[in-house]
Amino acid sequence: MSRYRFTKQKIDKDTGNRVYGTTVYPKIPLDDNDIFVYSIEGDRLDLLAHKYYGDETLWWIIAKANSLRDGKFALSAGQHLRIPQNIGQVLLSLRAANL
């Protein structure tokens, strides 16, 4: 699912191009069901999202939960990561924050 699904859009009057507003990402609180892992060589956010959620487009949930903001998919080996398991609630919060 696209992380921009709930982002407001409009059409630029001058160019006719679609323009996206700012996407507001929700805070992802700790949950007893969260999984904690250490990354290994070759791990990437999209691959972890596919492994744990079955959807590589949800990589941003792992990035947000771990305050990863450098724009890289690749992870260093040995990074301690939290993999949130309450993704349904995260997606509802994303929708609410952007409506």
Image (cartoon, rainbow, N blue to C red):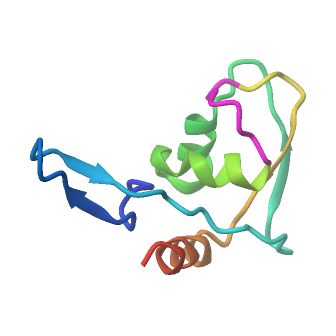
From this view, report whether residue 55 is shown above or below residue 10: above
Q: Nearer the viewer, residue 18 or 59?
A: 18
Q: Position of residue 96 (x, y in %)?
A: 51, 81
Most distant residue in the top direction: 41
Residue at image position (61%, 29%) is 73
The image shows residue 60, relative to residue 80, as above or below, that is below
**Residue occupying the point 69% across, 46% down:** 63
Which quadrant of the rendered structure holds the C terminus? bottom left
Pick the residue in front: 55 or 4.
4
Q: Nearer the viewer, residue 84 or 27?
A: 27
Say how many tags the image has.
Answer: 0
- Name the spot of residue 36 as percent of width and height, x first: 86, 52
Residue closest to the eye, 6 or 60? 6
Q: In the image, what residue occupies the spot 64% across and 29% down?
A: 44
Where the N terminus falls, by quadrant? bottom left
The dominant secondary structure in magenta is loop
Q: Is residue 72 magenta?
A: yes
Residue at 86%, 75% (x, y): give it: 32
Q: What's drawn in magenta, residue-wise?
A: 67-74
The image shows residue 13 at horizontal and vertical percentages of 12, 53
Looking at the image, the residue that sits furthest to the front is: 14
Q: 34 left or right of 54?
A: right
Side of 68 relative to 59 (left or right): right
Name which quarter of the figure residue 81 lies in: top right
Residue 96 on the magenta segment: no
Q: Is residue 86 above or below residue 57?
A: below
Q: Position of residue 5 (x, y in %)?
A: 36, 62
